[in-house]
Image: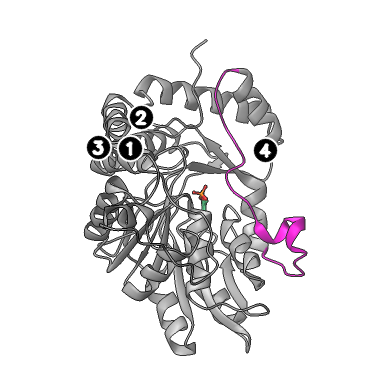
């Protein structure tokens, strides 16, 4: 049976060659020549004053909130329908995540919900480019500017997407990227913080490295400099091994994204007449990075039954992402009905850059059969 995995990381010979070079360079740890070159390339690509290479996007969100000065007891409004990294980061700094419901058509944070939730303790907003689709940044910026709040873009899934002609990752003054193995560009684990504020980047970089300047730089100085610890930091550095892989991946974003877009177009064409699913909606002012392809199942469809049939046929699938306010860890006493409904009715089907047209056809045929078998009239 031809197995069709839900996700697949496109890592190959070019990435292996880049790793081999790092092995012979003698500096596999973080903040070395590869890390520096990656930061320069990221800053250029995104037109950012500062780019900090980090071990993952969760670390980037944590450092962003620290650098923005979020204090215990502050409230930060976060998108509800997402992998819960933003709300976790808010909790890392002792602040309170306030969950904003999302647009029914896009799953991205609803600016009207955000405006309603702003209160005396609100300090900022974390918007998410939901599974690769950018949120409504112009509307969000109006709200955050009016109230003097910060705006962070969680672009973890959105490398290569655009909003009104601008790149995801450059849509807010601070943005966080993920290079986890399930994202569009990957080094296995990895992340980055991008910002228009060089001081914020410097602070985040220092805190990613135990609160001292890069050891690689220290080693280049003649004499015996003894680094001084001036603050408590973490170890959130990206290794130079991962940085080398990412430099190759960044060069391949266009090629990999074209493949994902072709898969999405084929799904849209083949499923256009399927009345038991609603296809993803991409507003005309933005483009999707297709980190995940989620269809919304009709209310009469038993999702678990459909998923079991797909998996029995060797086709990977999943629930998509999470309604954060329903996760017990937050003990949220809020309601986000749109997010809750998407959480119940979305089904993620295979999406990656190496799916063949034949595999996409098989996914669609199997899905159609499973939908008929598991729907009540
Ligand atoms: C994957 C993801 C993250 C976490 O990224 P890591 O690099 O695994 O820490 C954060 N936010 C969103 C929206 C994600 O999808």
Q: Are marks 3 and 4 in contact (CB under 8 Å)?
A: no
The answer to which quarter of the image holds residue 228 is bottom left
Task: Give the mark nearer the N terminus: 2 vs 4.
Answer: 2
113 relative to 368, above or below? below
The chief SS type of the magenta part is: loop
> Would you say residue 38 is visible in this rendering?
yes
Residue annotated with mark 4? 301
Dots 4, 1 in contact, CB < 8 A: no
* Residues drawn in magenta: 313-336
Q: Nearest the camera: 186 or 130?
A: 186
In the image, residue 142 lies at what x, y percent? 41, 82
| Mark 2 Cα-neighbour bin, 10 Å: few <14, some 14–19, many ≥20 | some
Looking at the rendered structure, the secondary structure element under dot 4 is loop
Q: CA distance from mark 3 to mark 1?
A: 16 Å
Res 42 quadrant in image: bottom left
How far apart in space, not on screen, are marks 2 and 3 (Cα)?
13 Å
Mark 1 closeness class: few <14, some 14–19, many ≥20 residues within 10 Å:
many
- Give 266 or 335, whichever is nearer the viewer: 335
Disc 3 marks which residue? 255
What's the CA distance linking mark 1 and mark 2?
A: 9 Å
Quadrant of image for the C terminus: top right
- The mark lying in front, picked from 1 and 2, is 1
Q: Residue furthest front?
A: 223
Query: Which residue position holds label 2?
Result: 11
């Amino acid at each position: 049976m031809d197995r069709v995995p839900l996700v697949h990381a496109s890592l190959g010979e070019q990435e292996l060659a880049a790793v081999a070079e790092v092995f012979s360079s003698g500096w596999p740890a973080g903040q070395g020549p590869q890390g520096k070159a990656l930061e320069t390339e990221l800053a250029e690509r995104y037109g950012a004053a500062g780019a900090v290479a980090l071990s993952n996007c969760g670390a980037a969100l944590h450092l962003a909130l620290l650098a923005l000065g979020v204090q215990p007891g502050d409230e930060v409004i976060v998108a509800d329908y997402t992998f819960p990294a933003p709300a976790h980061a808010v909790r890392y700094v002792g602040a309170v995540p306030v969950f904003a419901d999302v647009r029914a058509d896009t799953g991205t944070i609803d600016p009207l919900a955000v405006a309603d939730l702003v209160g005396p303790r609100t300090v900022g907003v974390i918007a998410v480019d939901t599974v690769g689709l950018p949120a409504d940044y112009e509307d969000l910026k109006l709200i955050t500017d009016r109230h003097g709040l910060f705006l962070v873009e969680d672009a973890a899934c959105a490398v290569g997407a655009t909003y009104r002609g601008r790149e995801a990752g450059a849509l807010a003054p601070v943005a966080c990227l993920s290079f986890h193995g399930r994202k569009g560009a990957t080094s296995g684990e990895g992340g980055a913080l991008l910002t228009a504020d060089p001081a914020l980047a410097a602070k985040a970089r220092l805190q990613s490295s135990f609160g001292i300047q890069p050891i690689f730089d220290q080693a280049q100085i003649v004499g015996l400099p003894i680094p001084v610890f001036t603050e408590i930091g973490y170890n959130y550095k990206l290794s130079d091994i991962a940085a080398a892989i990412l430099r190759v991946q960044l060069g391949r974003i266009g090629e990999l994204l074209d493949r994902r877009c072709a898969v999405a177009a084929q799904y849209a064409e083949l499923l256009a007449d399927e009345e038991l699913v609603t296809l993803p909606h991409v507003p005309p002012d933005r483009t999707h990075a297709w980190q995940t392809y989620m269809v919304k199942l009709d209310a009469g469809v038993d999702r678990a039954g459909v998923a079991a049939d797909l998996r029995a046929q060797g086709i990977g699938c999943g629930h998509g992402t999470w309604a954060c306010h329903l996760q017990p860890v937050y003990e949220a006493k809020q309601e986000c009905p749109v997010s809750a409904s998407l959480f119940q009715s979305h089904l993620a089907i295979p999406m990656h850059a190496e799916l063949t047209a034949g595999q996409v056809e098989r996914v669609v045929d199997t899905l159609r059969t499973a939908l008929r078998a598991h729907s009540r009239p």
